[in-house]
Image (spheres, rainbow, N blue to C red):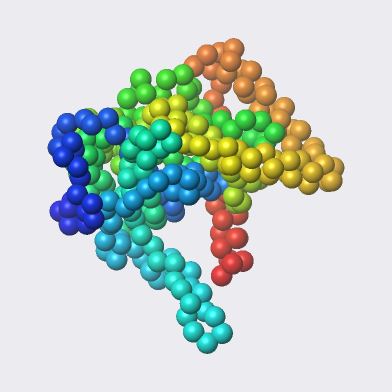
Amino acid sequence: MYPARDLYTMVVPPADEFSDGVSTGIVLVHGLTGFMDAGGGGRLAVKHILDHLEHRPVAYFHIDMLYDYRGRRPKTIFDSDHYESMDLPQITLSEVTDAEGNKFLLLHGVEPDLGWQSVVRSVVDLVRTYGVRLTVGIHAIPWPAPHTRPIEITAHSNDPDLIGTHQPWVGQVEIPGSMSALLELNLSQSKMPAMGYAAHVPHYLAATDYPKAAVALLDQIALATGLVIPRDELRTAAIAMDEDLDRQIESVSENIEVVSSLETQHDNLMQSRHELTADGQLVSGEELAASFEQYLAEIDEKGETES
C-alpha cells in the first residue's frame, strides 16, 4: 500500500483558508468513468460541468500505478503514415467555479483498475486537506422505466438526513463494487458526510448517451449543495432526443406496445409509492438484476462491435 500522498501531485497548493479537519464549506463532486453509468449520465454531467464552468486542475493522480493499459487500451488515432494522438487516461482533481462564483472540487477521469484502497485513502486525505463539507457522487443505472416519464433518482448517504424526501427503490441487493461506493464507505468510517445519486435510465437506452439522465443528476447536485450549474443547453438536447425517440417508436407498432406497457407499470408503481409512503412498494431485486444484466450485455456487445 502506498502512503496517501504518494499517489497524487498537487499542482496548485491549497489556499490558506484550507486546513486539516476544519470545514471550509466547499463541496467535492466525483464522477469517475468505468463503473456502471447507463446512458452515460454521470459522464455527460461531468463533461457539461467542465465545458460550461471555469475550472483549473489542482491535483493529478499518478495514473501509471493505477491503470491497466492492456486491459483498457487507450484510443489511438493513426492517420495515413503516422500516429496522430492517443487518448491517455487520467484522474484529476479540479477546482471549479459555478455561475455565482462559488468554488467546488470535481474529481473526474477514469475509475482506476488497481489500488482502490490506496486511492480512496488519498481522496479522504484531500477531503481533509480542503475541509470538504460534503462529498457527492453521481452515476446512472438501467431501470425498467419508459423515457416518456421523468428520470427518477436513487439517493444514498452515510447520513440519513442528507437523503431528505428521497424514498428507497429497492431493499437489500448485491451489486458490482465500485470505487465510488468504497469512497462513501470510507468517508462514513471517518465520520465525514457523503452521499450519491444514481439516475434511473430506461434500460432500452442504457447503451447510448442520454442527456436527460445528466440533467437529472445536475438537478440533484444543485438541490443538495446550492451550486449554480447552468444546464439549459443540456435540457434542450434532452428534449430533442426524447422527441426523436418518440418519432422512432411511433413508426413501429411493437415498440409502441413495449413503451405503453412500461408506462403502465411505472405509473402503477409511482401511485403505490405515493399511497404507501416510505415503506411502500419497492422494485424487486430480480427485476433490477435483469435490467443490470441486459445493460452489461449491451455494453459487451457494443465493445465487441467497436473492437
Q: In the rendered image, which quarter is residue 268 located in?
A: top right
Work out whether residue 164 or residue 95 is closer to the camera in this orientation and state it.
Answer: 95
Q: Is residue 153 left or right of residue 127?
A: right
Please state, as top left, top right, bottom left or bottom right, where the N terminus lies in the image. Answer: bottom left
- Name the residue located 40 percent from the left edge and 37 percent from the top edge: 98
290 with respect to 217 (left or right): right
Identify the image quadrant of the C terminus: bottom right
In the rendered view, would you say 46 is above or below 23? below
Please, is residue 163 above or below residue 288 in the view? above
Provide residue 255's location: percent of width, then percent of height: 78, 43
Pick the residue in front: 77 or 172.
77
Residue 150, image x, y percentages? 62, 30
Residue occupying the far bottom of the picture? 81
Q: How many marks?
A: 0
Say if residue 283 shows up in the picture.
yes
Establish if 104 lies above or below 295: above
Q: Nearer the viewer, residue 20 or 123?
A: 20
Q: Is residue 66 left or right of residue 110?
A: left
> Going 44% across and 40% down the picture, which residue do you hit?
138
Provide residue 142's location: percent of width, then percent of height: 57, 42
Residue in view at x 32 percent, y 35 percent: 27
Q: Where residue 263 appears, x then y in whole percent?
A: 71, 30
Residue at 32 percent across and 45 percent down: it is 95
Residue 196 appears in the rendering: no
Depth check, front residue: 44 or 270: 44
